[in-house]
Structure formats: structure tokens, C-alpha cells
Amino acid sequence: MNKKSIVQVASAILVVMLLVALPLVGCKAGAPKATKPAEVVVYAYGDLSGPLAPVSAPATAAMADVAAWYNAQGGIDGVPVRVVTRDTEYKLDMAIASYNTFREAQPKPLVMFTWGSAECEALASRYAEDEIVGYMFALTTKAIYPPAYMFPFAPGYVDTFGAFIDWVVDVWQKKTGMPVKLAFCTWDNSYGRSVLVDEAREYAKKRGVEIVAEEVFPMLYLDVTTQMTRIKAAGANWVYDNSLGQGPKVVSKAAKSLGILANDPYDTSPGKVRRATGPFPGGSDEATVRLAGDLAEGMIMLRAYASYAETDNKGIQFLDQLLQKNNRAGDQFRVAGYLAGTAGLYTAAETIKKAVAAGGWENLSGKAVKEQFEKTTDFDVLSLGKVSFTPDKHEPKKLKLYQVKGGKLIPITDYVVCPDLRPAEFRK
């Protein structure tokens, strides 16, 4: 073989070796594909033994029940979901401590659930700093804006109030011919005062509603006759509260003691006040109705999800089956809290699943989950309700109005779109 032939052969061998080696070099240079984890853990902390326990304890039970059902359906790309919970006894310092503990978990948390307005407001900036999604069962606007990592599972308190104003003007006022004279009588805490903001006042004024009184009372008060006496003197014909549990009952009880409570919103007797309660879960809850008894009759409530009275709803039928399967007997579980836990766990799990489908397990992070939340449009939550989020509006926008009739929450509207009453600086 001459010298030229030897060079040609050597060159050919070198080319072959390079072609064989290139895929191996590419494999080394590229990031290895992440393997599936053994589980996806979501964290939940809130009041399981204090004043919010009637809402948060059933919600926590529902999250465990739905996780088991969800995992039986295949989980997240074959990976099961596990819920880790902690009781914070409605104490802000315990909520902050729980967050600090959970944030150190490995792998880093993707989603945490929490209940109290005060803790959501206090920790909103921490969620953003740590890039962890906070899924809120409290609906306080102060935690939602500026939009970062907090997402409420239903419209916020102020938007919800706006939906009530639309109904009371467009339906009640037109039917009765009476001008709306509204009073607030609500809890004296972050939760209760969430509606005592300029955006709510300005929207009421814009729609022609006169706010004649703003009264507050401590969360544990059982008698607000003093506040209701001032409301009566102010000439109110509607009283709106932002409370839960005993709160709505306490307000209506005071009105009845003064002889001014109307159990029919269309009773036009002079001097009567009609009642509405806004938050969900919480005030607009089967538990509230049972606690108030006859005092709740005729009350207007606002909910983003179906009530247990809607027995033809597929989501309510699913809940009935879930309750039965998990031996959740008794009225303490047939409440908005159990529905909230169901909706929250399912929505979060499905959103994490979308993040995995979009970027793979290797790119799964709180930021990736947040971005998928912001792409959510009319997501069907097990036929119980629908939620939408956008990058600048981290609040669902649809709900129904209900009236208590015969001790049941009966829908009196189809879904309505809440007015956008976010703080002025965050409006486009």
C-alpha cells in the first residue's frame, strides 16, 4: 500500500470514529433527563382546631380523600400525590413557623395551601421570593395583588361583593322599586375588613347604592345589638357581612331582636333589613345555614361552586360518593370546606400535571406551576365550578348567587361574571 493510500484509509477511520463519538459527546454535554419522583408532596397548613376549623378541618379531610382517588386514576404522570398538613390554631406565628418548616423540604415545595386571611397577607411576599405557589382558601385582595405566586380558589372578597351589588341593583331593586341602602356589619379582623375598602365603596356608589353604615365586631362576639341599633337608625334595608361560622347568625339574630329582620328578600315592609353574606368558603356555607337555623331563611349567599342542594350536579354526586367511600358521615363534612378541599387539591394536581407535560420532570418547579396556573381558562373543576387565571388577574371571576330556602342553598342565578374590583393601581 503506497503512502497516499495509507493516508486515505487513516482519514476514513478517523471520520468513522468521530461519527461514532459524536452522539456520546452529545449525551455527556446535554442535561440528563430527570427520572420520575416517588411522589409529589403538597403542603397544607391552617386552623384545624380553632375558630376556622369548621371550614379548614373538612377541607383537609377532603384533600386526603381526593388525593387517594386521584392517585387511583393514575396520579400525575403515574406519580402519586401526598398531602402533608399542620394545624396552626388560627395563630399567625404558628402559620409563619409552618411555612418556614415546609419551605425547607426537599425536594422544594411546588404548592402550599393555606386558609387564614392574615397569614396569606403576611406571607404573600415570601411565597414570591421562594417561588412557591400559594393556593388560598382565604380570598383577601391584599394577598393577591400585586400578582405574584398567590392564587385564590374563588373570586376575592371585593369582587364577590361587586357581584352582590350587581344583583341587588339589577334584580332586587328593579323588582321592588326600592333604592338600596346598604350597611356593613362584619368581623373586626383582616377577614371581615376585606370588603371595607375604597374599591367596594366606589363600585356601590357607581351602581347607585348608598352605604349608610359600616359596623364591625370582634370575631367571638355573640351579640351585636348595639351595632344593629345604629344600622337601624341609619335606615339600611340590606346588611352585608364578611364572616363565617357564627358570624352571619350573630348579625341576623341582632336584627331579629330589634324586629327588623326580613326572611323574604322581597318583603317590602317599611323598616325591614334583608341579609347577605359574601365569603366562600365560610359564610356562604351549609354549616352557616345549619347554625343560623330559621335566622338564615331568605339570606343571599354567593358561591363559586355548587351547593349540596344541587343533587343533579355531577360534581355534587361525585362528592356524595367520595364522602360515603371514606366514611365521612354527618353534616360536618357536607359543607363548603369539604368542597373547597376537593376543588383545591384537584386543581393543583391537574396544574402540576400540565407543568410536567409542558416541560418534563426535569424542569418542574414552583415557577413552572405558576406559569401553568396563569394559562388556566374556564378549567372545569369536577363539574363543581370553573376557574380562570391570567398573569395580571390571579382571581377566578365567576360565581352564582344563592338564596336560603327551606334550609337549603338554592341557586337564583346562573354563573355571573364578577366586576373587576382589584386595587386601582393594578387595573389596566
Image: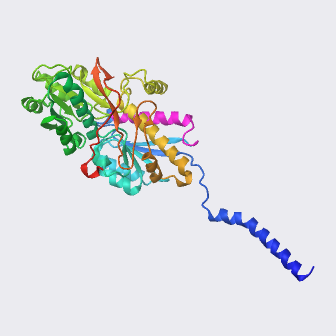
Where residue 221 appears, as percent x and y from the top left, is: 17, 34
| Residue found farthest to the right | 1
| Residue found farthest to the left | 233
Q: Is residue 80 left or right of residue 269?
A: right
Q: How is the image coloured?
A: rainbow
Is 100 in front, or is 190?
190
Q: Is residue 177 left or right of residue 378?
A: left
Is 143 in front, or is 20?
20
Is 324 in front, or is 17?
17
Residue 152 image-quadrant placement = top left
Where residue 10 appears, as percent x and y from the top left, is: 83, 76
Does the magenta segment cover residue 72?
Answer: yes
Is 324 in front, or is 297?
297
Where residue 78 appears, as percent x and y from the top left, is: 58, 41
What span is colored magenta in the figure? 55-78
| Residue found farthest to the top | 406
Residue ID at (38%, 57%): 129
Instruction: Say above or below: 164 vs 367.
Output: above
Q: Is residue 37 left or right of residue 149?
A: right
Instruction: Say above or below: 280 vs 124.
Output: above
Instruction: Say above or below: 78 vs 338.
Output: below
Residue 20 image-quadrant placement = bottom right
Residue 320 image-quadrant placement = top left
Residue ID at (33%, 43%): 88
Magenta span: predominant SS is helix
In this rendering, the count of numbered labels is: 0
Does the magenta segment cover residue 147?
Answer: no
Using the rendered image of the protein, determine whether residue 188 is visible from the camera's viewpoint. Answer: no
Using the rendered image of the protein, determine whether residue 118 is visible from the camera's viewpoint. Answer: yes
Quarter of the rendering occupied by the N terminus:
bottom right
